[in-house]
């Protein structure tokens, strides 16, 4: 049997090495834990039976006029998130939506993945789209829905600096999928909606105009009130939970 003799100097060196590794690990954990992940608003915690219907408009425009008609028939206000390039292409539809009483909000200027941009580029995307919308509607947007639902801390911080809110959704109709059917869209939405929900549709999905009347009638029959996202969310004294639920901070 071989005996290994460790000197006091070697023990000291080993302890220093172990301590160094421990400090490095603890330090990395502390840094990681100290980096707070900022979140957009996915839905709102509320006792009121209110929900918000939203549409993203980035590419086509075949169904916009029909959607305006359906929403008008059911007296439902909706929030439309539009891309600046879409505004350039279809200014008459932006005006028609606004004239029909719907809110026009920001969906970026060119529909990029925002986290791939610098803060300056993010700001330019948002402000450029804001100006285009305001030029037609006379109202500057207060909300942004990031393209692809893609965001990071930098985007949330840029939005905060612009005094705007970043909006996602908690009910996705998945109306954009090739496999979507009117029945499937309707079932998905009506089964997932709750107080404070934000529902996502698209203005040029194949079956949304077919599904929408049934959805609106069903939700109205269940007692839901439709409001703009800007009226659904809290503007001050709030926090956002880990799942993206915005809730009011009450002073006890």
Image: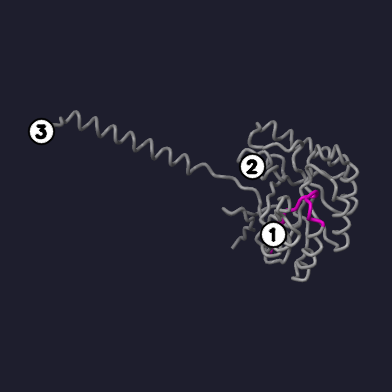
Tell me if residue 122 is in the magenta stretch: no
Q: Residue at x 63, y 37 (%)?
A: 115
Q: Quadrant of the C terminus?
A: bottom right
Quarter of image, res 181: bottom right
Upstream in the sequence, badge 3 or badge 1? 3
- Asked if 3 appears above or below 56 in the picture, the reply is above
Q: Secondary structure at mark 2?
A: loop
Question: Can you identify the residue that label 1 sits on?
Answer: 197
The answer to whether the residue labelled 2 contacts the one labelled 1, judged by CB atoms less than 8 Å apart, is no
User: In the shown orientation, is residue 108 left or right of residue 68?
Assistant: left
Upstream in the sequence, badge 2 or badge 1? 2
Which numbered circle lies on residue 2?
Answer: 3
Quarter of image, res 219: bottom right
Q: Quadrant of the N terminus?
A: top left
Q: How is the image coloured?
A: one colour
Tell me if residue 197 is in the magenta stretch: yes
Judge depth for marks 2 and 3 and give the one in front: 3
Q: Residue at x 72, y 66 (%)?
A: 49
Pointer 3: residues within 10 angstroms few (<14), some, or many (20+)? few
Q: Secondary structure at mark 3?
A: loop
Which residue appears farthest toward the left when viewing the image?
A: 1
Question: Can you identify the residue that label 2 sits on?
Answer: 151
Residue situated in front as seen by the camera: 68 or 16: 68
Q: Position of residue 228 (x, y in %)?
A: 78, 56
The region drawn magenta spans: 195-209
Q: Position of residue 40 (x, y in %)?
A: 65, 48
- Asked if 234 appears above or below 114 in the picture, the reply is below
Q: Position of residue 176 (x, y in %)?
A: 73, 50
Q: CA distance from mark 3 to mark 1?
A: 71 Å
Q: How many marks?
A: 3
Q: Position of residue 8 (x, y in %)?
A: 16, 31
């Amino acid at each position: 049997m071989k005996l290994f003799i460790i000197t006091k100097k070697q023990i000291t060196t080993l302890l220093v090495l172990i301590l160094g590794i421990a400090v490095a690990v603890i330090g990395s954990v502390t840094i990681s834990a100290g980096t707070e992940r900022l979140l957009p608003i996915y839905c709102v915690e509320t006792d009121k039976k209110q929900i918000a219907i939203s549409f993203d408009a980035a590419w086509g425009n075949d169904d916009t006029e029909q959607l305006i008609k359906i929403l008008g028939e059911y007296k439902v206000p909706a929030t439309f998130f539009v891309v600046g390039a879409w505004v350039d292409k279809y200014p008459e539809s932006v005006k028609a939506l606004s004239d029909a009483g719907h809110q026009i909000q920001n969906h970026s200027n060119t529909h990029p993945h925002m986290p791939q941009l610098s803060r300056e580029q993010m700001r330019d995307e948002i402000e450029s789209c804001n100006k285009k919308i305001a030029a037609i509607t006379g109202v500057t947007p207060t909300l942004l829905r990031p393209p692809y639902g893609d965001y990071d801390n930098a985007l949330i911080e840029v939005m905060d600096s612009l005094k705007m809110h970043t909006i996602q959704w908690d009910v996705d109709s998945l109306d954009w999928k090739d496999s979507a059917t009117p029945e499937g869209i309707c079932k998905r939405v009506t089964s997932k909606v709750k107080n404070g929900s934000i529902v996502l549709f698209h203005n040029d999905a194949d079956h949304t105009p077919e599904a929408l009347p049934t959805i609106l009638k069903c939700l109205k029959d269940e007692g839901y009130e439709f409001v703009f996202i800007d009226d659904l969310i809290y503007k001050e004294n709030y926090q956002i939970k880990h799942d993206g639920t915005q809730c009011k901070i009450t002073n006890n």
